[in-house]
Image (tube, rainbow, N blue to C red):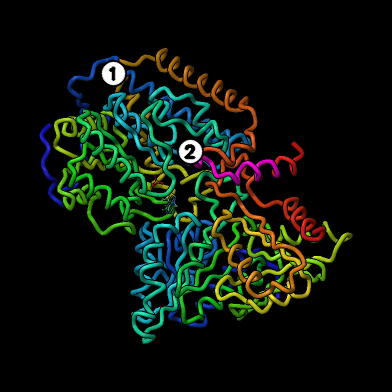
Amino acid sequence: MAQTLRVPGSHDLRRVIGDGEAIPDGEVEGLEERDLLELYRSMVLLRTYDERSVVFHRQGRIGTYAIFWNHEAMQAGSAYALEREDWIFPSYRESAIGLLRGMPVSTVLSWWRGHPAGWWNPLDYNVASICVPIGTHVPHAAGLAWGKKLRGESSCAVAYFGDGATSEGSFHEGANFAGVMRAPLILFCNNNQWAISTPLSAQTAAETLADKAVGYGIPGVRVDGCDVLAVFEATRDAVARARAGEGPTFIEAVSYRTAPHATADDPRAYIDLERVEEEKRRECLGRYEAYLRRAGVLSDELAESTRAEAAEALRSGIAAAEEEPPADVGLVFEHAYAAPPASFAAELAELRELLGE
Amino acid sequence: MSELTLVEAINDAFHTELARDDSVLVMGEDVGRAGGVFRATAGLRDKFGAERCVDTPLAEAGILGAAVGLCMAGWRPVCEMQYDAFSYPCLDQLITHVGRYRWRTRGAMDFPLVVRMPYGGGVRAPELHDDSPEAYYAHTPGVKVAIPSTPADAKGLLAAAIRDPDPVIVLEPKLHYRTMRGDVPAGEHVVALGRARVARDGDDATIVAYGSMVPVAEAAAELLAEEAAVEVLDIRTLKPLDEEALLESVGKTGRAVIVQEAPRTAGYGAELAAILAEKAMLDLRAPVIRVTGYDVPYPYWQIEDAYMPSVERVVAAVRKTLEF
Ligand SMILES: Cc1ncc(C[n+]2csc(CCOP(=O)(O)OP(=O)(O)O)c2C)c(N)n1
Ligand SMILES: [Mg+2]
């Protein structure tokens, strides 16, 4: 699909999945049945991870957790357009995206359990550490993409961030940097229309977030973020541009946050519950499942076995996370420096003595 | 007088100060519709309107920079940073402008703004929800820094900060937001900036602390009660510091243990220790000891307790000064 600079104010969302009625189903060129089912497996795994995590939180088995229900299409669709050598820079909302790169479930659960086993080596998966301060990883992704280009490598990077993040200075500086350096970067904005209690209308006066791309001299595209195939296609186009040396692309994937911001949040004070119910009815996994069934690709048995597989991954994942031995307090002093200051040894010895170790 | 939690006391201060002075304006992420993620600003939007309790875009440098401009337009903005570590994007504005603008105008203009934020650890939260950044603030010329440790002081210091002609940073111990209750004077209640508080009387040694470390110091003093009478000095305002109270207490006891949750090197405790070295040399009967966090990023929460200055660490330090 040809990319052009967006005209500010146009609101069309790229869409592939129909509604089974008035809107016909489309197709993505080059995606075979096996790809369609792989995308399905990814979404089911993420959905299961998310739903189980909310339960684990209630049971006190993980700490505060940032729910990503109805964000699975954005994560699975975009990640599937990447090669293994490409880098992913997740925010807390994409905490489990590493699962799509073979990261163990127990690793991600350990992160939310505040256990060091959750702090993975980014080089193992080409997935950077989870970024908690909003938007601050965008310049990192720009730098990595630029650096790969300088080295003559063909890999690119994706930075994930929310609608609220587009208000941060770091987002702006990173996007601008990537534009100027023509860095092979995909700026992937999960526009779930809320930043905790702040609606998009209080976040920006721009008509669309994709409009912001104009200011960086890069293309901005809008897709239906609950349409995994549209997300995949838009990301694939952006990756192709990046590899062809044409620089970054901003993707605004529009969805809706139907869950609380995180387990500690009570959205009843600010959210329109009717709208939430409406959005839940068009949630991304159900829509994709219906599409696959209409296409004759997904049977009841396959859906059932896919869900069972994911459920089992979560069962064994939480068991493995809970079997991690308690972290040694010595870890407090490790890894901040390549060569720790001499004082650390004495401080640790004193601490161990006080703890009776 | 009513019994309130620490965060309710802050909310009480807001209701009182916004009613008292209609140039006071509250701004920050999620302070309006949601009333703040800790509910410190609950009810303000309904009572005073969306223009005096403003949900801002997600942009800390923008919030503080806009607050500078709001001051120029005659407002007294009170900015919320959602968490300690999320205030860092605002440091640029703080250092390059907030702390310098009065000086730049040769005293012609006031910048009566407040930045308040929950700070500190112990809450089993994901990364960067646990920092103690007071030294960055205290190190910045032109701004004042206050850290309450009780509900009454949380109300009184915030009121003082709002009324002060200079920029004031208020760090609030989030660990005690909802768990600490205490009597809080109703209506207008101001605790003057720059005045320490003797939280516990004693003649044998002084524990100097602020914010979340005051209860730790008090617990340590209680544990030591049979061995020694330990004074706890809650300094409340880091800048300007109540040097007189510090020197008076240590002059009396001759022994000082300074407790801070923040990392050790160049922390605020070093400042307190330096003042004692400069001005209390002849009163000291033992070396000043600091009990602090370590020079590491705040750890994974499963082992955060090992990082925190514990009652045991404070007790051990006090004993060391007593036995010196
Ligand atoms: C620099 C910074 N400021 C504030 C916060 C607190 N905070 C956490 S999530 C959030 C809202 C983020 O909204 P958005 O960017 O839309 O992403 P979403 O959570 O919706 O995925 C805020 C304000 C933070 N993490 N980092
Ligand atoms: Mg959002």
The answer to whether B294 appears left or right of B29 in the picture is right
Instruction: Give me the residue at 82% from left, 56% from top.
Output: B223
Residue farthest to the top, as pictured: A301
In the image, B19 versus B313, the foreground residue is B313
Could you tell me if the residues under marks 1 and 2 are in contact, i.e. CB atoms within 8 Å?
Answer: no
Instruction: Give me the residue at 63% from left, 63% from top.
Output: B211
Mark 1 Cα shell of 10 Å, populated few (<14), some (14-19), many (≥20): few
Q: Is residue A345 magenta?
A: yes
Residue farthest to the front, as pictured: B282
Instruction: Tell me the tag on residue A235.
Output: none
The answer to whether A71 appears left or right of A114 in the picture is left
Q: Quadrant of the N terminus of chain A?
A: top left
Q: Earlier in the sequence, mark 1 or mark 2?
A: 1
Position of B190 relative to B222 (above/below)? below
Q: Inspect the image, locate mark 2, and give the three-letter code of the amino acid beneath it.
A: Ala
| Image: magenta residue range | A336-350
Q: Position of residue B302 (x, y in %)?
A: 62, 39
Helix, strand or loop at disc 1?
helix
Instruction: Identify the residue under disc 1.
Output: A35
Instruction: Give me the residue at 14% from left, 46% from top.
Output: A6
Q: Mark 1 against mark 2, which lies toward the viewer? A: 2
Q: Position of residue A215 (x, y in %)?
A: 17, 53
The answer to whether A196 appears left or right of B213 in the picture is left
Q: Chain of mark 2?
A: A
Q: Is residue A241 magenta?
A: no
Q: Chain of mark 1?
A: A
Q: Quadrant of residue A33?
A: top left
Q: Inspect the image, locate mark 1, and give the three-letter code of the amino acid beneath it.
A: Asp
Instruction: Identify the residue under disc 2.
Output: A338
Q: CA distance from mark 1 to mark 2?
A: 43 Å
In the image, B171 versus A5, the foreground residue is B171
